Amino acid sequence: MTTHFSTRQIKGKGRGKFLGYPTINMLIPPDFELVDGIYAVWVTLEGIRFRGALHWGPVPTFDDVVKSLEVYLLGVDDGALDRTTISVLTVEIVKKLRDIQKFSSVDELTKQIRRDVEEVRRILHE
């Protein structure tokens, strides 16, 4: 199982931003092996370490079966991500939070993301 990896940013669909949790979408590295789910991670960008909530897998709430690899960085505002060109991200997987779920509504998904982010804060308290 993959425990850390480096990759680059790719263009996403903008759903995270729409939900209020803008994510960095990532190119899936060769030989990437990780069970689908939501994870607490450390992300290093430009030598700076951030706490993150990582999604790996399909997005069933939006009926999307194609797997995506994306991360929400805690404490980084949306505008900063829009203005930043990210060359390489290094991700260290710390703990799986939960499996991928299909939610009955976008509102339910957003509430769960909020809980996931709080759990990441507890796990990676620094």
Image (cartoon, helix red, strand yellow):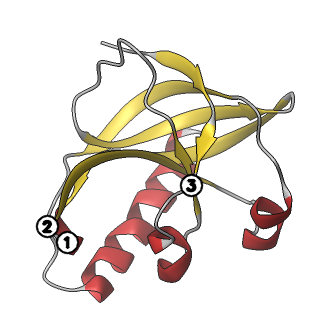
Q: Residues within 10 Å of mark 3 (few under 14, many from 20)?
A: few
Question: In the rendered view, would you say 67 is above or below 61?
Answer: above
| Residue at image point 13% right, 82% down | 104
Question: In the rendered view, would you say 96 is above or below 83?
Answer: above
What residue is pinned by disc 2? 102
Real-space Cα separation, disc 1 to disc 2, in angstroms: 5 Å
| Residue at image point 50% right, 35% down | 27
Q: Nearer the viewer, mark 2 or mark 3?
A: 3
Name the one closer to the observer, 82 or 103.
82
| Residue at image point 47% right, 27% down | 94
| Residue at image point 19% right, 46% down | 99
Q: Residue 22 sits in which quadrant?
A: bottom right
Q: Residue 57 sits in which quadrant?
A: top left
Label 1–label 2 contact, CB within 8 A: yes
Q: Residue 84 sits in which quadrant?
A: bottom right
Of callouts 2 and 3, the N-terminal one: 3
Give the SS element for disc 2.
Answer: loop
Real-space Cα separation, disc 2 to disc 3, in angstroms: 23 Å
Give the SS element for disc 3.
Answer: loop
What residue is pinned by disc 1? 61
What residue is pinned by disc 3? 11
Give the SS element for disc 1.
Answer: helix
Q: Is residue 126 visible?
A: no
Of callouts 1 and 2, the N-terminal one: 1
